[in-house]
Image (spheres, coloured by chain):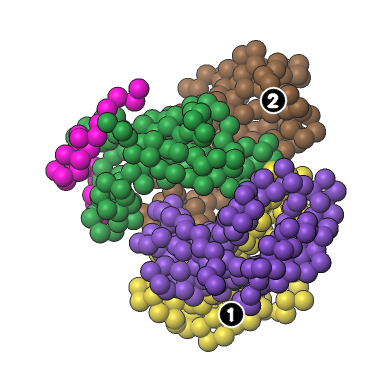
Chain colours: A purple, B brown, C green, D yellow
């Protein structure tokens, strides 16, 4: 089974004077990749989920390790998969590669909320089914 | 009469590999300064205006000239004032200085909208009065 | 002749509480599109041009008109082409479309600099030739 | 002993359509606060440290917990202090508050590098002394 991959074009404006991507941008790359995972698997990203389906998935934790600098020399390939599913929470693992080299990896936990109540909720059954079909350990 | 000044702390993450602020950040600095102008004069920025007062001010045009590179060596001092007031529109001029040197200047036009209708509207009388009291030419 | 198109994935994080892309992000989209134009036509973006070829192209002016709100509902398709070439300067026009609707258009002027001297310079002949082959009026 | 505080003006453009700060911005707030810690204690932020003093402090890990949503209603007050000092590494703890409420907390590890060699190095003695004088547990 191969996991979902999201490609990011790293640009000049993502880099800092050390000529590598500014660390403050890297969590945003990971989040964009998780949003792309949702979009690929459910037909829409967070905008669609929130506005059309009343499903929010705010983050409760972020844990990342930086392995190698990111530059504009190569596209950044982010692999994303769910690692766990609780009653009202979901965990994702993200790994970012450039030219075959692991640049960062991270684990993220989100909760499912009913947007109109901003209250934790159990996700719809089809989302549970989808996530369970893709789940595997971080490594 | 002295115009409103908004101070921005320029950081490492705002800079690109040329060791100056990335141009793509500069319009955002100008917009932040205009929001700070509203906050200073009306008690709240765009969040307050939109959510509490039903007043939106979306931008219709941006025109900026870059005069000198911006770096983290100094705070960026942004001077902001309104330059014109139409029935449903407002113009702002912004100038950004570091260490007494003009780094950029720009002119911005916004329209007033009733947020719940996303429709152009005349602003409240007290906003007209405020803006008219501060208006002066760009230079 | 068809112009270069650059596609941008608009995400949740690009939007503000008005549920449209924050205006402060739009100039950065246009700049990313101009960088993508360089990358497509010369084999590398600004990072490559600056570090490997000693060619910088800092912006001296930005003029943009916002035509229609941008949302995550569609990819943003940015059309880019050069509109003029001076001895040491270049003009670009960028138009952003979503679902066939013009969202913004803008004109941008950059100067060519020799990076090691941070001094205006005439661009290499092959860049002049490339740009002249693509040049056409803004509209 | 009171720790260093850095104040951030949260704006409209930092928020997403859920009307709270976009999670992808929060790590950047924490990093800005760590940079402000260096600036306050050594006379310059990362730009000064890298360019003038040949000291880089790239991040190797980020671990954050989101406690409460951040909005533009209040300034964000970030408390920062060092939690450990190794031979070539340093740990920081950051806590962000709005209106007395803890919004996020995080732990960050950086390594010291000699910029001209991009190689791990022991920091200068005065930096060791400074850090040791401020060190205390995360909580």
Q: Chain of mark 2?
A: B
Locate residue B51 relative to residue B79 in the image: left or right: right
- In this view, the residue in front, D38 or B109, is B109
- In this view, the residue in front, A51 or B28, is A51
Task: Please give the range of residues in magenta.
Answer: C114-139
Count of marks, rendered view = 2
Question: Which quadrant is home to the C terminus of chain C?
Answer: top left
Q: Compared to D10, does D96 lie above or below?
A: below
Q: Which mark is residue B54?
A: none
Locate residue B68 relative to residue A79 in the image: left or right: left
Q: Compared to B84, does D126 lie above or below?
A: below
Residue D105 visible to the viewer: no
Q: CA distance from mark 1 to mark 2?
A: 48 Å
Q: Position of residue D113 (x, y in %)?
A: 44, 76
For image coordinates 59% across by 40% down, the residue present is C73
Question: Which quadrant is home to the N terminus of chain C?
Answer: top left
Depth check, mark 1 against mark 2: the one in front is 1
Q: Which mark is residue B118?
A: 2
For image coordinates 31% across by 33% down, the residue present is C2
Q: Position of residue C133 (x, y in %)?
A: 20, 35
Q: Which residue is mark 1?
A: A139
Please identify the residue farthest to the left as the structure is shown. C125
For image coordinates 36% across by 31% down, the residue present is C93
Q: Secondary structure at mark 1?
A: loop
Please identify the residue farthest to the bottom as the structure is shown. D87
Q: Are marks 1 and 2 in contact (CB under 8 Å)?
A: no
Locate residue D99 relative to residue A107 in the image: left or right: right
Q: Does the magenta-highlighted stretch encompass residue C129?
A: yes
For image coordinates 82% across by 60% down, the residue present is A122
Residue A55 visible to the viewer: yes
């Amino acid at each position: 089974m191969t996991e979902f991959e999201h490609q990011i074009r790293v640009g000049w404006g993502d880099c800092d004077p050390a000529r590598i991507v500014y660390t403050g941008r890297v969590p945003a790359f990971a989040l964009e990749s998780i949003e792309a995972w949702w979009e690929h698997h459910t037909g829409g990203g967070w905008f669609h989920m929130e506005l059309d389906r009343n499903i929010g998935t705010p983050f409760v934790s972020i844990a990342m390790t930086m392995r190698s600098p990111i530059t504009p020399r190569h596209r950044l390939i982010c692999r994303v998969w769910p690692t766990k599913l609780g009653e009202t929470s979901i965990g994702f693992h993200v790994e970012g590669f450039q030219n075959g080299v692991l640049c960062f990896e991270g684990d993220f936990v989100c909760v499912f909320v009913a947007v109109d109540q901003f209250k934790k909720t159990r996700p719809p059954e089809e989302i549970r089914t989808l996530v369970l079909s893709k789940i595997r350990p971080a490594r």
